[in-house]
Amino acid sequence: MKLRAVAALGLTAALALTACGGDAGDEATPTTDETTPEAAETADAGDEGEEDAGDAGSGLSGEFAGMGASSMRVAQDAWTSAFMADNPGVTVSYAAEGSGAGRGGMEDGSVQFAGSDRAFTLEENVAGNFAACTADSIVLDLPVYISPIAVIFNLDGVDNLNLDPATIASIFKGDIAKWNDPAIAAHNEGVELPDEFITIVHRSDNSGTTENFTDYLSQVAGDVWDAEVSGDWPYEGGQPAAQTDGVANAVGSGQGTIGYVDLSAAGDMGTVSIGTDGTYFEATPEAAAQVVENSPVEEGRAEHDLAIALDREADGYPIVLIAYAMACQNYEDQNTADLVKGYLSYISSAEGQDLAAAQAGNAPLSPGLQEQVAAAVDSINA
């Protein structure tokens, strides 16, 4: 991968890809029974920051909990199960309640790690106020999951559509009301489009997926999309649905519906290929990875805070989601630090990334990005 270096952080090497963590089921639930964050018991942590679940967890014991993005629930389910199997003294849970809930959990101290489809802003991180951490600690934003956000639809007899950014923005803003609108037809010669109203399905909760989606529309179709980038859906109307599962279920059970989800939640629904000038990119992990290759770490970030500024106009499928694991750089007690450190070492390792790719279909981290994340995880302490 050849990520440009910014603020002395370079992310390099080609992404080694296999076939975004998706969601299944109607409600997001913790991987295990509810845990008590304070229940971690002091134990010998063994070798910290090793590259697989067995090595990372040698001697670990205790309980800890995470919460956050529903986009990577499938990956988190796989990771927590594998980590606990290799570390029988450990109980770890992940409640897929949304990115905003995960960031809030780091702020109020209700969880020891979080998942989010956007990083804490530089201002949020510098301000601190993270009850999960020591008073002087920042939160490390660690990319662990790369995936496209698929624009999905349910339209009888149509499996794929080509659209440009302005048309997508016009549809989701509500300016285009019917499927046979000339703006849609212009990109889909030979496709029989029905004279049918479009039903927009959007997230009802504060969502990192929504924030990435609106960021894309703001960057590349700003003359149409006049709303601010936000994790909350900015326009009235449409059909709201909670979390990734809710959007996928609403689109799949409707007719003439359109929405946006992590790719693995798309199932057998129709998907949109996106492009301009007659060149369209399908929503695949490989295409999404092309965008990450050309995207820098945000300027001004502290060492080991790996928030990436996505270049939405780079070649490839442009609506990309990077899900971050969020952890304190400094915890109040060593055992909690060791537990989180061991878990994040595993999920960012080649073994953990391959497991997620097999279960969720996301793009694994490249060796270069893995190296950057490993160094950041190694800085976690108490």
Image (tube, rainbow, N blue to C red):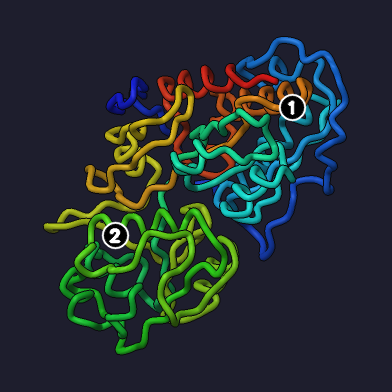
What whole-number distance in Å separates the C-alpha atoms at marks 1 and 2? Answer: 40 Å
* Quarter of the image where one finds residue 29: bottom right
Q: Is residue 12 visible?
A: no
Q: Is residue 304 visible?
A: yes
Residue occupying the far top of the picture? 47
Q: Is residue 29 above or below residue 42?
A: below
Q: Give the quarter of the figure containing the C terminus.
A: top right
* Residue 223 falls left or right of residue 347: left
Q: Is residue 119 above or below residue 319?
A: above
Label disc, if present, on residue 218 of the rendered structure: 2
What is the secondary structure assignment of the residue under circle 2? Answer: helix
Q: Which residue is mark 1?
A: 332
* Residue 332 falls left or right of residue 314: right
Q: Give the quarter of the figure containing the N terminus.
A: top left
* Residue 316 falls left or right of residue 352: left
Please tell me which residue lies in front, 150 or 235: 235
- Identified at 58% across, 22% down, the residue is 377
Using a 10 Å C-alpha cutoff, classify the residue at mark 2 as few (fewer than 14 neighbours), some (14 to 19) or many (20 or more).
many
Q: Position of residue 84 (x, y in %)?
A: 78, 31
- Identified at 50% across, 48% down, the residue is 117
